[in-house]
Image (cartoon, rainbow, N blue to C red):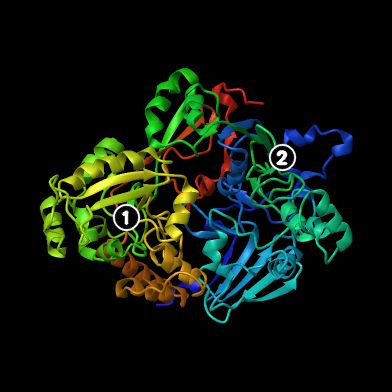
Amino acid sequence: MMLDFCKTTLALALALGWLAPPALGQDYKEPPLFAGLPQNKKLPPIAERLPKTPIVVGSSGQYGGDIITLVPRPRDIRYISTFTYTRLVGYDRNLDLQPDLLEKLENEDDRVFTFTLRAGHRWSNGSPFTAEDFRYYWEDVAHNLELSPAGPPEFMLVDGKPPRFEVIDERTIRYTWEKPNPRFLPQLAGPLDPGIYRASAYLKQFHAKYADKAALEEKAKQQKLKSWAALHNRMDDMKEQTNPELPTLMPWRVMNAAPANRFIFERNPYYHRVDAQGQQLPYVDRIIMDVSASGLFAAKANAGEEDLLFRGLSMGDIPVLKQGEKAKGYTTLLWPYARGTELALYPNLNTVDPVWRQLNRDVRFRRALSLGIDRKTLNNALLFGLGVEGNNTIVAESPLFMPELRTQHAAYDPGQASRLLDEIGLTKRNGAGIRLLPDGRELEIIVETDGESSLVVDGLTLIGEFWREIGVRLFVKPQDRTVLRNRSYAGLTVMVAAPGLDNAIPTALMPPTELAPMRQDNYAWPKWGQYIETKGKNGEAVDVPEAEQLLKSYETWMNTGNREVQRAAWHEMLRNHVENQWVIGTIAGALQPIVVRNGLQGLPAKALYSWEPTAMLGIYRMDEIYWNKAVGKEVRR
């Protein structure tokens, strides 16, 4: 049955839990931060700064204050665009897509998407946000080979073809593909905003089409850049947050640039959300990010120095964080991390070593390694016994969840594991009981990891003990992440240890890209991924029938706007993964600690945490967090 998703209009309405806006402009309440500005910096009245149809949320908070948090290095201020989560369309807490920056979205069979912008919506510098910002990106950035040598982003291509782009009027744009492009909306709602619009009024001064090219080249030279295009790309920095002059649509705008040890983000005067009392979001005036060594994060939180901290903390920090709660006036929220598994083993099916390639491609070998892991002991040692043992698959909160997939081929059965290894022919052993490969080498698996997670390294040490019982030796090789990825891409790794599925709470409309052999950053099949990503120029074609079936299932998902067909494709791919043990999962369900100073209100006591699709805290709306002065906590300035 074709679902309503296939031809739908997403618009603000009571049914979506949003309210009608205050009736008159004078009902809006000016943030005190702006009310006290000197005369030469006065802003237009708030009613003139808001769109005619702002989003009206159901929260009820108070204006003012700062939130102090930490980043491990200056570049990590860029993650604010993930967790403040301002998108054309975004997920709500039920993981349904809703218009955000858009006033309305019309979707015809995942082929034709018509966007309607909000009348009167403005960038943070007051310039209008209109269809011209989309046209500028599409024609003058994405299709300018000097600015974008690779052309339009891959998710906007179907069978290698871009959409027909149309500007209908100042507030309406349309994208039309010949075939469905079901990836389009989920990509727009992702943790990294692909930015298919730009602040055109600001950026045109750096574009050779609109400004004097010779002058731009000279300016680029002064900044030690190669060309006007490099200058434009430096100024056009929506993701990295390095240009305080670049207008934004986010709730807070960066006020200073590196080098610095403290970065300040101040409220956007033109932000498009208000509450039912007529207060413009965000409630909090500033987000302040201090740079600190990541190893000090838990200690600084324990000392009560931070207002809100989550990224950079892990489950191992929970005991020290809990110790400081009462004395230092904060609470540690514990949210389940929605990941397929905390520790996954990726046998490299594309490794250049022919003996290991043949072994890794034997499903009996992969199953034997899975059956040789005592997941209960791992759970008790690493997750305080609170985790979920089993395969690398999606979690129970996903509407696509199938409970049997968590346990298939994932019980601890060293006897069966040994029998499978014998069946393969790995029957010879050395004096220490370690099996020998066909060429006489010891069956020693070098498991490479980026070494950033103590849980992964500690878990591998335990797995080494389990595998010794079945005649397999494990050697852990930590290294820099960039080095690890380059070794993987070159086929030099035999096995890699890393976290499992990034999006473990998918819905049918989210693309199952992680499950298909089409990305080189999947350690199980990097060369297959290269082949797909480069359209056959590099890497290797998929040559294992069961993996080819994953590509066929993905193609089925891609070529329809029917959510039931897409749901079936998801289920087929999930079953394929567990049956074939492409990736060996261990334990899931780690808890993400989130330190919140007492008096800071608005976050749920418990919710799912993930990179995708929750954008860390993004879907829980940080713009609605506020200081509750009634509890006696003075806001931090």
Give the class, few, some or many, for how many residues have Cα within 10 Å of label 1's Cα (few <14, many ≥20).
Answer: many
Q: Residue at x 50, y 27 (%)?
A: 301
Residue 87, image x, y percentages = 60, 56
Viewport quadrant of the N terminus: bottom left
**Mark 1, residue position:** 392
Q: Residue at x 14, y 49 (%)?
A: 430
Residue 309, image x, y percentages = 52, 34
Which image quarter: residue 543?
bottom left
Residue type at tag 1: Asn
For this rendering, which residue is in front, 633 or 15? 633
**Mark 2, residue position:** 257
Q: Residue at x 72, y 59 (%)?
A: 198
Compute the Cα span from label 1 to label 2: 41 Å
Residue 174, image x, y percentages = 66, 73
| Residue 512 in sight in this render | no
Q: Quick one: SS at disc 1?
A: loop
For this rendering, which residue is in front, 395 or 448? 448
Above or below, 401 against 338 in this view is: below
In the picture, measured across the screen, residue 574 lies left or right of residue 100, that is left
Q: Which mark is residue 376?
A: none
Residue type at tag 2: Ala
Q: Residue at x 86, y 63 (%)?
A: 213
Give the class, few, some or many, for how many residues have Cα within 10 Å of label 2's Cα (few <14, many ≥20).
Answer: some
